[in-house]
């Protein structure tokens, strides 16, 4: 099976973005079965707070549903803003099955600066591709959300995100690092344009399978859940050790990660040094 | 702030290995004031419970405090530095062992003991583990010590970072087969948590058996320091002893991407972190116990609950 990530340059002109997405998808028609992952805010432009008309939203969903159905592919739609009751604006990303139907969605609030908020739910979908963890926006760059999905069994993370940090190279390298420390495959679709720096990547625990810089292009790679199943199985000869981080955890030691008012002092058992040293 | 990372080599003569370690601290003093000196895990040599190393029982393990640690305390005092004493196999004198990393302060006192909390290999059977993750306050700020395999649990570095540890020392050993991904994982952990990560590794190899199978364990150095921006600012080679002397610019702690990410955490939603991995279907401690034919510590003492291990 294949992972396919169209990295589409987009601005705040929704119709131009739509044409760019169609152009990009047309390049990958007939590739094979697998999953297509689109970047965060790919139709509206990264950071664009404007809610597109419901007509446009419906059209994009129909476009991608038809595409999924015609190509027999899973499609993670990237996201676009929608309005909920009382004027709450959210980014919505959907996972569509090969029949074009919606299987799951991730919704994240849009903050006043137009950025996407972190969330409280960390969805997983079982599929013939394996257990898929759905990620939207900055949750990917926190340790905890992705970790929770992997603890629940996610084998491949579909990420509609963006590289926006001030250290682009480190942020891209971290995609692989996150794959390693969680023993998981990652399909990261990075927004491009409007301050988002591309970096779409396919990463496995051992390294990158493919990645893009800041070009408008498609990155593809092979995916087999068996690879992850194999490296997650304990090898008690300890020649292969990547299983260790999932199997050897001691959850009672990590309680502070769940404490809302954790201030980082005595509760984790701080030891005080009995000397003061001149710096 | 200046740190020194000692990359040591396993040699057959343990007395010589010890003398080299003492000498390394004395030599560092020639380069001016150093705030922290960090040694690798098992800097004296392989522990007796590694494959084929049974004759080292009583040789590379030691009581704490004892003559070896006394000497390091005296060195720390005379040089005026903190020593993160890699790790020693601590003989608890009641038949039990721990993988212990001492923090010795510049007044020559043991200021803390970071015991490995996530046992690796035969340690799962033969060593007891820390029952908490502790940070240490020093006159130079708060630090954390993650002993080797503790690093591979990302929750550990996160716990330290949220506790405001600014520098996290990782006395470890780079398995040759993990070398490239180890470097990237270390810099990723530094970047995502916005901390300095100081990693000290040794060079050496052991051969022996695990169960019916011959194995070789090879450690490939690659000690390094990664900054809060995810940049590896110093890195040692993979086939010999080396000392890294590295200046840490603590201002970088205030200007890193991790600060904004940590501010967006939603800890109330992270309760599932306290659940075990759903894929656990085997009792690894029991399997290892059968492999090495040793009684499990969990047969004689209560051990903390952990995934895949027996709980008495």
Image (spheres, coloured by chain):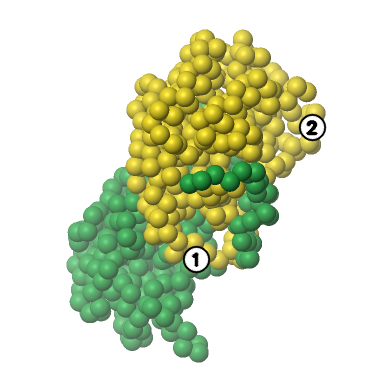
The chain in yellow: B
The answer for which chain carries disc 2 is B
Q: Mark 1 lies on which chain?
A: B
Say which mark, if any, is on residue A276: none
Note whether residue B170 is visible. Answer: no
Q: Mark 1: which secondary structure?
A: helix
Q: Are tags 1 and 2 found on a single chain?
A: yes
Residue on which the image places disc 1:
B263
Horizontal placement of B306 versus B32: left or right?
Answer: right
The one of A127 and A12 positioned closer to us in this rendering: A12
**Left or right of A268, for residue B181:** left
Residue sitting at 36 percent across and 22 percent down?
A: B239
Position of A253 compared to A191: left or right? Answer: right
Q: Is mark 2 on a helix, strand or loop?
A: loop
Measuring from the top left, give residue A4's x and y in whole percent: 30, 55
Q: Position of residue A185 (x, y in %)?
A: 41, 48
Q: Residue at x 32, y 78 (%)?
A: A48
Q: Which of marks 1 and 2 is nearer the N terminus?
A: 1
The image quadrant where one finds the N terminus of chain B is top left
Q: How crowded is mark 1: few (under 14 residues within 10 Å), some or many (20 or more)?
A: few
**Dot 2 crowding, Cα within 10 Å, few <14, some 14–19, many 20+:** few
* Chain A shade: green
Which x, y percent locates residue A205? 41, 42
């Amino acid at each position: 099976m294949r992972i396919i990530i169209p990295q589409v340059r987009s601005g705040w002109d929704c119709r131009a973005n739509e044409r760019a997405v169609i152009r990009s998808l047309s390049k990958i028609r007939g590739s094979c079965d697998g999953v297509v992952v689109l970047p965060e805010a790919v139709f509206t432009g990264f950071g664009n707070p404007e809610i597109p008309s419901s007509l446009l939203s419906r059209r994009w969903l129909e476009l991608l549903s038809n595409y999924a159905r015609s190509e027999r592919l899973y499609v993670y739609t990237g996201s676009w803003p929608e309005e909920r009751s009382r004027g709450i604006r959210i980014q919505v990303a959907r996972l569509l099955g090969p029949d074009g139907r919606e299987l799951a969605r991730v919704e994240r609030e849009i903050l006043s600066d137009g950025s996407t908020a972190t969330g409280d739910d960390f969805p997983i979908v079982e599929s013939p591709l394996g257990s898929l963890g759905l990620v939207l926006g900055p949750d990917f760059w926190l340790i905890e959300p992705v970790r929770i999905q992997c603890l629940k069994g996610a084998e491949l993370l579909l990420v509609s995100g963006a590289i926006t940090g001030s250290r682009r190279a480190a942020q891209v390298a971290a995609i692989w690092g996150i794959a390693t420390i969680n023993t998981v495959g990652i399909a990261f679709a990075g927004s491009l344009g409007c301050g988002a720096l591309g970096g779409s990547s396919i990463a496995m625990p051992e390294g990158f399978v493919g990645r893009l810089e800041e070009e408008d292009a498609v990155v593809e790679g092979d995916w087999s859940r068996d690879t992850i199943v194999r490296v997650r199985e304990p090898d008690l000869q300890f020649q292969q050790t990547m299983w260790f981080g999932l199997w050897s955890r001691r959850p009672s030691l990590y309680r502070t990660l769940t404490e809302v008012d954790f201030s980082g002092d005595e509760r984790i058992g701080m030891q005080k040094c009995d000397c003061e040293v001149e710096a | 702030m200046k740190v020194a990372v000692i990359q040591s080599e396993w040699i057959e003569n343990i007395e010589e290995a010890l003398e080299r370690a003492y000498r390394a601290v004395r030599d560092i003093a020639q380069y001016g004031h150093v705030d922290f000196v960090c040694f690798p895990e098992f800097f004296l040599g392989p522990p007796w419970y590694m494959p084929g190393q049974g004759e080292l029982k009583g040789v590379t393990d030691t009581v704490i405090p004892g003559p070896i640690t006394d000497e390091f305390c005296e060195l720390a005092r005379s040089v005026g530095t903190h020593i993160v004493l890699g790790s020693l196999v601590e003989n608890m004198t009641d038949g039990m062992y721990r993988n212990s990393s001492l923090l010795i302060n510049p007044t020559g006192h043991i200021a803390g003991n970071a015991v490995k909390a996530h046992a690796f290999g035969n340690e799962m059977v033969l060593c007891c583990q820390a029952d908490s993750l502790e940070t240490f306050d020093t006159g130079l700020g708060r630090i954390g010590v993650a002993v080797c395999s503790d690093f591979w649990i990302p929750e550990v570095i996160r716990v330290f970072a949220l506790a405001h540890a600014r520098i996290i020392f990782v006395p470890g050993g780079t398995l040759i087969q993990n070398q490239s991904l180890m470097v990237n994982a270390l810099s990723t952990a530094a970047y995502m948590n916005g901390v300095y990560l100081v990693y000290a590794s040794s060079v050496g190899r052991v051969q022996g058996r695990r169960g019916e199978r011959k194995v070789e364990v090879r450690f490939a150095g690659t000690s390094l320091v990664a900054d809060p921006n995810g940049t590896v600012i110093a890195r040692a080679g993979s086939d010999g002893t080396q000392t890294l002397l590295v200046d840490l610019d603590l201002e970088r702690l205030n200007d890193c991407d991790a600060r904004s990410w940590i501010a967006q955490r939603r800890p109330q939603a992270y309760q599932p972190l306290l659940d075990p991995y759903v894929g656990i279907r085997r009792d690894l401690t029991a399997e290892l116990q059968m492999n090495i034919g040793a009684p499990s510590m969990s047969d004689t003492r209560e051990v903390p609950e952990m995934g895949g291990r027996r709980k008495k």
